[in-house]
Amino acid sequence: MTKLRLAIVGAGPAGIYAADILLKAERKFDVSIDLFEQLPAPYGLVRYGVAPDHPRIKGIINALRDVLDRGDIRIFGNVRFGVDITLDDLKHHYNAVIFSTGAVEDAPLDIPGIDLDGSYGAAEFVSWFDGHPDVPRTWPLEAESIAVIGNGNVALDVARMLAKHPEDLLPTEIPANVHEGLQQSPVTDVHVFGRRGPAQVKFTPLELRELGELNDVDMILADEDFDYDEASKAAVASNKQVMVIDRVLQQWRKRETGQASRRLHLHFYAKPLEVVDDGSGKVAAFRYERTRPDGQGGVEGTGEIREVPIQALYRAVGYFGSPLPGVPFDSRHGVIPNHEGKVLHPESNERVPGVYATGWIKRGPVGLIGHTKSDAMETISHVINDQADWWTPVEPDEEAIVALLESRGVAYTDLEGWHLLDQHEIALGEPQGRARIKVVPREEMVAISRAQPSDDGTPSA
Ligand SMILES: Cc1cc2nc3c(=O)[nH]c(=O)nc-3n(C[C@H](O)[C@H](O)[C@H](O)COP(=O)(O)OP(=O)(O)OC[C@H]3O[C@@H](n4cnc5c(N)ncnc54)[C@H](O)[C@@H]3O)c2cc1C
């Protein structure tokens, strides 16, 4: 029987679902899958993006773990495509590759002052609070008044993590350095700015509602933002999600405020104009133009300029994919150009045989974890039907890729290694009654993963 040797690059939900779907699919050939991941731990943004105080979503990891624990997918962690292995290596050893490398960069916000000291991308901050090994251990939390730009769920995550009292995060899996960092924060006011009105936000009701449940944090809204135009009234009346969002906001408007030590302000109809310099290169204020509904569900400028004093600003205006060496890239949209997951040359639009994409790097950084499953189904259906276009590898032997990594001195980790790290993190959390405490430094993650377990099952490193 023919055998498909498939490489998948990126062990986030998209890569793991793709592997699972292919293994369970009806097909006329055998399959052997190797999953390459640049980090020593799998699960992508579910581990390093989803906020630590969202344990229900983090729980999706259990379903992904079940797939890996079946043992029919080999995982090579701590292996970076483009550094440790190349496209030519994959052609040498496999019949095809699926890229599921996601998106980790911040999309740009092109306004004056965005590069000032104290202006940050949400993705960097998210990586810090989720204990990503490749970002610094400390985060400058010195501002009393902070702006968050954006009206999607990531903006709400960032605002919530900044406004929430650190002791309320203790039951979660936040790393010790993050808890310590947040304890130093003198923040009193977090201002979230959106360009459009309450009936046009991109965040979802569940995530919004959470803000109102924060201990010792007042929700501050301005009456002027709730003078709805006809298009907004129609959206509230016809769209269930908008209706619920409106209901939540209206309830907050009626709440008494003034007692809490922290405030979370939601500003609508605010178009970013500039991050104002304090004269020494640091953030001093956020300048915006007040907008108004344009009657068609959009907004237009009013010419009225406003300013809010702040000392730090976070832009949460979207994520952006990164190019991979030797792989086509659409630098305008931050994705690998493709048709239904089949990768295309950016200029000619011709098919690149043997190369596929799935997840955020295929579709762009929008949508929930569940969407990566339907994405993977589409890509896998093409992998199955494209047999005539697969590569013909010179060394398809499963041990040959292991020998290659070893010859290059790549300290790769495997499923067994991940189990060791996972158990280690769970054991760290136990004395404090926490589900786990993440290990953050990459060297430590690798050392634990590559250690021989001792007789009692704990790693000896
Ligand atoms: C801040 C934030 C909060 C979110 N919260 C939620 C939520 O509450 N609920 C929800 O449903 N969705 C949430 N999402 C969306 C969800 O995270 C994504 O839908 C999903 O993770 C996308 O999956 P993916 O596999 O395409 O990408 P990713 O999860 O990013 O996985 C990509 C993987 O590829 C690896 N990789 C990248 N480059 C290389 C390389 N060169 N070599 C090897 N490996 C590489 C990465 O390390 C990563 O592990 C959130 C997203 C963000 C950013």
Image: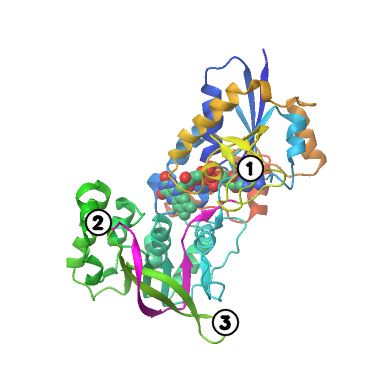
Asked if the stretch drawn in magenta spans residue 264, the answer is no
Counting residues from the start of the chain, the first of labels 1 and 2 encountered is: 1
> Few, some or many C-alpha atoms within 10 Å of disc 1 (few <14, some 14-19, many ≥20)?
many
The residue under the point 63% across, 18% down is 30
Does 211 sit above or below residue 72? below
Give the residue at the far top of this rendering.
1
Badge number at residue 231: 2
Quarter containing the N terminus: top right
**413 relative position to 49: left or right:** right
Q: Earlier in the sequence, mark 3 or mark 1?
A: 1
Quarter holding residue 74: top right
Front disc: 3 or 1:
3
Tag 1's secondary structure?
loop
Amino acid type at image mark 2: Ala
State how far apart marks 1 and 2 are (Cα): 46 Å
Q: Is mark 1 within 8 Å of ligand 1?
A: yes
Instruction: Tell me what residue is drawn at x 21 percent, y 58 percent.
Output: 230
Q: Nearer the viewer, residue 104 or 353?
A: 353
Tell me: is circle 3 under 8 Å from ligand 1.
no
Give the residue number, with chain letter if any, for mark 3: 281
**Label whose residue precedes the other's in the sequence (2 or 3):** 2
Label 3: state its secondary structure: loop
Q: What residue does disc 1 label?
A: 37
Q: Is residue 64 left or right of residue 5?
A: left
